[in-house]
Amino acid sequence: MIEIQEILFDARAIDRKVNELADRISRDYEGKDVVLICVLKGAITFTADLMRRLTMPVELDFTRAASYGNSTTALGDVSITKDIDTDIKDRHVLLVDGIVDCGKTLDCLRRRYTARGPASLKTVVLLDKRSRRTVDVPIEYIGYEIPDRFVVGYGMDFSEKHRNLPYIAEIKSS
Ligand code: IMP
Ligand code: MG
C-alpha cells in the first residue's frame, strides 16, 4: 500500500516557484521564439503551468523516454519512445521535465535533440535530486533541489498513480 508521507511543496509553493522560473526564462528569451519540449508524462502539469506564464512566443511539442529499472529507480538504458514532430533545426529549444534523478533521461534527450542542430537547447526541471546524479547533464533552470526521496503529484507518479495530486508529496511504501 502506498501512503502520502509528507507534503514537500503545496500548490502555493509550486505556484510561486513556477512564476519565478517563468520570469527568469521570459527575460532570458526576450525577443526569441521558443519550442518547448514537454517530457511525458511527468512534466505535463509543470509545462502547462509554466507555458502560460512565459511572455515570448512558444510552440509546444512532446517527447517520451522510457528507462529500464523498477518503479522507483532508473537502472539501465534510456530509450526514446515518442519523438517530437517539430523541426528544431535553428530553433531555440527548451526541454521541460518534472524531475531529474540520476540524469540519464535528460542526458539521452539532450543528445538526441542537440544532434538536430537547434540554435540553442536548454533544460528546465522543477525538481532536482542532485545527490543521485550519475550523469553530468547541464540543467540551466532548476526549481527546487530535493533530497533522495521518492515523490509523487503535480504530474509525477508511482506506478502511474498520484499524477493528479495538486501538491508534491513524499510517499512511504509498506
Ligand atoms: P533519471 O533518468 O534517473 O534522471 O530519471 C528521471 C525520471 O525518473 C523522471 O523523468 C521520472 O519519470 C522518474 N523519477 C525519478 N525520480 C522520481 C520520483 O521521485 N518520483 C516520480 N518519478 C521519478
Ligand atoms: Mg514514473
Image (tube, rainbow, N blue to C red):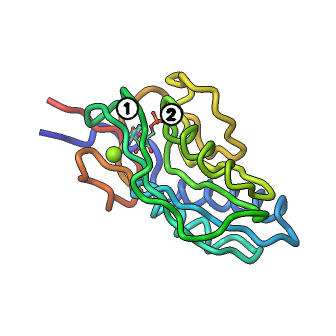
Q: Which residue is mark 1?
A: 74
In the rendered image, the vertical position of residue 77 relative to residue 47, given as above or below: above
Would you identify the image quadrant in which residue 133 lies?
Answer: top right
In the rendered image, the vertical position of residue 117 relative to residue 49, given as above or below: above
**Position of residue 44 in the picture relative to residue 53 (left or right):** left
Mark 2 near mark 1, Cβ–Cβ under 8 Å?
Answer: yes
User: Looking at the picture, how far across and down is residue 168, in whole percent?
Assistant: 41, 49
User: Looking at the picture, how far across and down is residue 87, in whole percent?
Assistant: 65, 68
Give the farthest residue toward the right: 31
Task: Determine the quadrant in which ligand 1 lies.
Answer: top left
Give the farthest residue toward the bottom: 57
- Tell me which amino acid carries mark 1: Ala
Q: Nearer the viewer, residue 88 or 52?
A: 88
Q: Residues within 10 Å of mark 2 (few under 14, many from 20)?
A: many
Q: CA distance from mark 2 to mark 1?
A: 8 Å
**Position of residue 75 in the picture relative to residue 107 (left or right):** left
Of the 4 image quadrants, the one containing the N terminus is top left
User: Looking at the picture, how far across and down is residue 131, in whole percent?
Assistant: 54, 22
- Tell me which amino acid carries mark 2: Lys
Q: Nearer the viewer, residue 35 or 147?
A: 35
Q: Disc 1 beta carbon < 8 A from ligand 1?
A: yes
User: Looking at the picture, how far across and down is residue 119, in whole percent?
Assistant: 80, 58
Q: Which residue is mark 2?
A: 104
Name the residue: 59% across, 47% down: 112
Residue 105: which disc? none
Q: Disc 2 beta carbon < 8 A from ligand 1?
A: yes
In the rendered image, the vertical position of residue 69 relative to residue 33, given as above or below: above
Would you identify the image quadrant in which residue 77 lies?
Answer: top left
For label 1, the SS is: strand
Name the residue: 52% across, 69% down: 48
Of the 4 image quadrants, the one containing the C terminus is top left
Name the residue: 88% across, 72% down: 31
